[in-house]
Image (cartoon, rainbow, N blue to C red):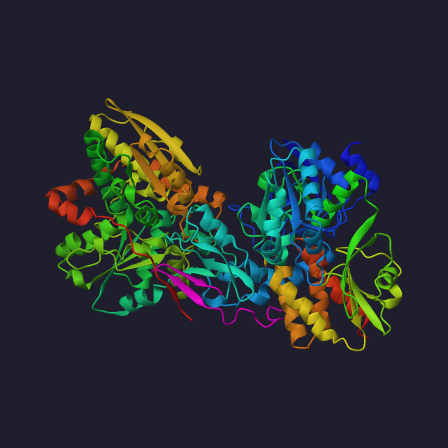
Amino acid sequence: MKIKLKINDKEVDGSKGESILTIAKRNGVKIPTACYHSDLEPQGSCRLCLVHIKGREGLHTSCSTLAEDGMEIITDSSEIRKLRKINLELLLSQHIEQCSDCNWSYKCKLLSLAKEYRIKINKFEDRKKNFPKYQFGPSIIFDSSKCIDCKNCIQMCKKQGVGFLTTEEKNDFFQVGFSSKECVFCGQCITHCPGGAFEEVDSITDVEKELADEKKYVVFQFAPAIRSSIGEDFGMISGSIVTEKIVAGIKKLGANKVFDVSVGADITTIEEGGELIERILGKKDLPMFTSCCPSWVRYVETYYPKFIKNLTTVRSPHIILGGLTKSYFAEKQKINPKDIVVVSIMPCTSKKYEIERKELYFNKLKPVDYVLTTRELSRMFKKHNINLSKIKDEKLDSPWNDYTGAGVIYGSTGGVTESALRTVYEKMTGKKLEEIEFKSIRGMKGSKEVKIRIGKKNIRVAVINGLGNAKKLLEDDPYKYDYVEVMACPGGCIGGGGQPMPVNNDIRKKRALSLYKIDKKWGIRMAHESPLVKLMYKEFFKNKEIVHKFCHTSYSPKEKMNIIKIK
Amino acid sequence: MNIVRKIKEADLKGRGGGGFPTGIKWELVKKAKGKKKYVICNASEGEPNVFKDGYILENYPKEVINGINIAADFISAEYSYIYLNKDYYKKIKNRLEDIIGNKKIIIFEKKAGYIGGEETAVCESIEGRRAEPKKKPPFLTDCGLFNCPTLMNNVETFYYVSKISKGTYQKTRFYSVNGDVLNPGVYELPENLTMVQILRETNNYPDFDFFVQAGGGVSGEIMLSEELNKPVYGAGSITVFNKKETDIYSLMEKWAEFYHKGNCDKCAPCREGAYRIYEMIKARNIDMEKLEDIFLSLKKTSFCSLGRGMPLPFESLIKKIKK
């Protein structure tokens, strides 16, 4: 139902059920917030988004007050400004400012509000100055001294179906604490934390050391989802495609080669498609689950080990490509694989954990040595005065530069499935797939479905977007599907826990759309039509053993993670 | 005559502190649409120096349960709950269960601190979540426990409903009288008595210079002896302080500590404000500008009424006593 209301004497339209804040934002009216995030139920805890409503006593939080027809709202007054100022001071009185190495840095809402409202940041002695830092596995740091107690992380962790983060009473405060549930390292706590209290475990220091070591041959490879997101960190609009700029930037950092993980994705597609065909024909362990999202894999291994057999054994794209760099490429270039350092730029915090999995080692080598998140790469660029928006394009390095459209769309929810189906259809039927775009599994819905007739078989496919939607599928009836894709992060990798901040559904849509645009314009849009992939199967993947060594892995129930207290 | 008409004629108002007209509340729940409805008897009484609900439960449990049953019948409740604070749970749970017999009343032990008594927090707690207040509206009468229309009254209110239904209500209420008095205790006296009358009637009127805290042992307002010619509001407590012998700082420190430890830490003004008030008072180093800012924010921007009411005792004490 449409409603009309007035905000600061200007008539605006809205719909019933929308909050005052939502309507104000859409109409360009700025209302300050700290705890608000459009992905979450309003917490109403920061008390900054206060407004007057004519005819109602007192002040109201616009995030949690629904707009009504005929409402007259005032979003600014001297009283409102004074109260916002006090509450900002109180919020900052608990928060230790570590702006220089914060994920928010110059995009920090708290800092810009502090300037706007002329706050004395240190009006009170910091309440949390001795609060500890915690590390979860090799992925995530929680610096509780920066936490402003909005509890967004707890809500998001619950929404992800994990519930590792919880409220705990400690020293007379209800604070963010840890339950007995296992963290899966998705990093959504990071992207939903307004205080910058959550961050990735730093790998920049190590990577810089490797870059400075002349004996090392440093190879960077970046994920499909990076190219349409990292521009945001350099003032470009969401969805700006900057593939060649990333290459140029990384070259400036001193890397020997820059490769594209989309090539690895094409190989994943071939192997995963092949495995799906085998399983469908053999009616074995269906549905088959995707496995390129390590948080999803960890979720299955920890919470639903009975479904481990359903995970495809195919390695994720960057692991395959890293392995090929240290074997095929090393041999061609006559470089000792031990001297090669592979650095993956990932939209993801969980990939930092994935590369430590012993199951992935080959010849005692890690296929990938370090993972930097998109944000970490931005930080490195900035440190070296590399402005991505101004840098001149450079081309990717051979041989891992010849990818397909199918590889690129891996970065979005539904992309893995779409790529696999394109290949599976043509391989199973020997016919050309006419409609290669699977529109019903694109987009930001939490769970999506597609049925496709391949030869005599009806293949039923589910796409789960956001880990929180996986539980329902697993517990309802997973067996009605043949193939299930799960991406832990909302939107898939483009919305990953390692991606630029802020993020919301509008931003995710733009990032995803750009990947589909690349695919649409690409000459080759099927993994199995890639000349490079064909060459690899001819030259390198000569037998099953080699394919297995580089392209497949195994899973098992996992040990409990240790939470390490840092200070 | 229908029970609500009787309640309205008796002009019964909620005795938990809010003072909302009981009859109107009952009608709202009765009229609200919902397949299931619930009654909750709030026996969370958790403020220092207020203990009349415990007294009533110990001495008149049958009347209270009768009141709950009347309410449950009236709104056709699926279940009724008695939300009982820890101490009372230990002491009287068994006796209550004997009286309840086969009626559909569930005794629920309150696990949370002070904030656990706020009505939306009570519902959260019974539903198995952390006791934390929820945004109003929706009000409980429309959307309370398990998102169903819910009738929540205080122990004393149910006690008087029972009296009203029997025609024995005589417009009395329960007063907790304590502090520097000779005869502390709970007294049932007419509701329109002034505080002076209450203190005299109970042989507690001091013969020294004094002030009182009225309506709640922490949240109550500070009143000087010359201000007591009016009834007591809130939870009906009167705590007497010997003006000469009371250390104002330790008194405020007690309140501040209670608020700091007992609030739910959800919203910034309450969580950080209560902590800073406590910090300043404990250090006996009050920055009045900071304190006034915090009070202003608490009154105007706190999530729930607990936070909004926090400044009252401090402000009244500072204004009236500390010159």
Using the rendered view, name the quadrant where residue B195 is placed. Answer: bottom right
Identify the residue at horizontal 25%, vertical 46% (top origin): A263
Magenta stretch: residue A117 in it? yes
Q: Position of residue B26 (x, y in %)?
A: 73, 38
Q: Position of residue A86 (x, y in %)?
A: 66, 63
Using the rendered view, name the quadrant where residue B262 is placed. Answer: bottom right
The part of the chain drawn in magenta is A115-144
What secondary structure do most residues of the magenta stretch adopt?
A: loop
Q: Is residue A565 above or below residue A455?
A: below
Identify the residue at horizontal 15%, vertical 54% (top origin): A327
Q: Position of residue A59 (x, y in %)?
A: 71, 51
Using the rendered view, name the quadrant where residue A510 is placed. Answer: top left
- Foreground residue among B120 and A519: B120
Q: Farthest residue to the left: give it.
A: A543
Q: Position of residue A239 (x, y in %)?
A: 43, 45
Q: Answer with left or right where residue A566 lies relative to residue A453.
A: right
Q: Answer with left or right where residue A390 lies relative to residue A399.
A: right
Magenta stretch: residue A512 in it? no
Quadrant for the C terminus of chain A, please: bottom left
- Foreground residue among B42 and B268: B42
Q: Is residue B21 above or below residue A49?
A: above
Q: Is residue A399 above or below residue A134?
A: above
Residue A235 seen in this snapshot: yes
